[in-house]
Image: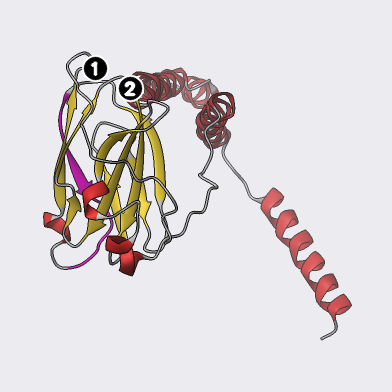
Amino acid sequence: MSFEAKKQQSIQFLQTFFIQLRALHVDRLERKWIALSLGIIGLFVGIITLDALFHGVNPPSKVETIDSARLHLSQEFAENNLGVQVDDRGQIVIRMVAGRYSFFPKQIEVPAETPLTFRWVSMDVLHGVHIPMTNMSTMIVPGYVAEVHTTFPKPGDYPLLCNEYCGLGHNHMWSNVSVIAKEDWQAPVLASVKKGANNE
Amino acid sequence: MENMSEEDRQRILESTPIGTFALMSIVIGGMVIAWLFLYYGVFLPRG
């Protein structure tokens, strides 16, 4: 069948469909319920969309790659460079590695009510990480660095949970983060901070 | 109910279902309020 013939057939089908749809009897009360249901959905979607627009919320667009098989040889994600650090501009950066079946380092301490930057890499398979009662949640895809900017409002002990099936031990894959009051937190002292290219 | 005349029956059948609208408003209003509370009170404060 030629393209024009298929196009005409599709138009004919759509016209027949909408004629039959308009001919359907829908009770007045049911119409009201449908209208209200659609109205509520529209209201919720509208609120979320407007909030996202005004607060600059959008999917991350930065694509940063890394060799997941050679993390230990990279400058940024070598074992002695993981954990909580304060960079030259005073920003707190947390570098973590996800691997079956834990997050490394297994215990970290961060301050509350302070902007934090998490940089996640995977050393094996696809993982997801979520800290309950916060908005720190991201997929960790092998070969890429996942960066999340967040702030923890309340001090306390939170688990870091894996929320993407990664193997038989997935349900045991978790570690801890202690959120400490801003005035009580002390920046960790490290010998040197390596934040250079991560794909060396 | 057994002593209802045909006129009364027709009047009731053709009248506006006020009870249904009241129930509809309560349910939908409650759902919207609950959603707004969870969104602005719980979700957004978590960052």
Q: Residue A182: which disc? A: 1
Taking depth in this image into account, of A101 and A55 the one nearest to the observer is A101
Span highlighted in magenta in the image: A156-167
Give coordinates of residue A147: x percent, y percent: 41, 44
Q: Secondary structure at mark 1?
A: loop
Q: Residue at x 34, y 59 (%)?
A: A74
**The image quarter in which residue A132 lies:** top left
Outermost residue toward the front in this view: A191
Does A168 appear above or below A171? below
Give coordinates of residue A146: x percent, y percent: 40, 49
Quadrant of the image for the C terminus of chain A?
Answer: bottom left
Outermost residue toward the right in this view: A4
Q: Amino acid at mark 1?
A: Lys
Taking depth in this image into account, of A183 and A80 the one nearest to the observer is A80
Q: Residue A114: which disc? A: 2
Query: Pointer 1: residues within 10 angstroms few (<14), some, or many (20+)?
Result: few
Quadrant of the image for the N terminus of chain A?
Answer: bottom right
Does A185 appear above or below A191? above
Examine the structure image and report whether residue A71 is included in the region drawn in magenta. no
Q: Chain of mark 1?
A: A
Q: Chain of mark 2?
A: A
Examine the structure image and report whether residue A160 is included in the region drawn in magenta. yes
Q: Amino acid at mark 2?
A: Thr
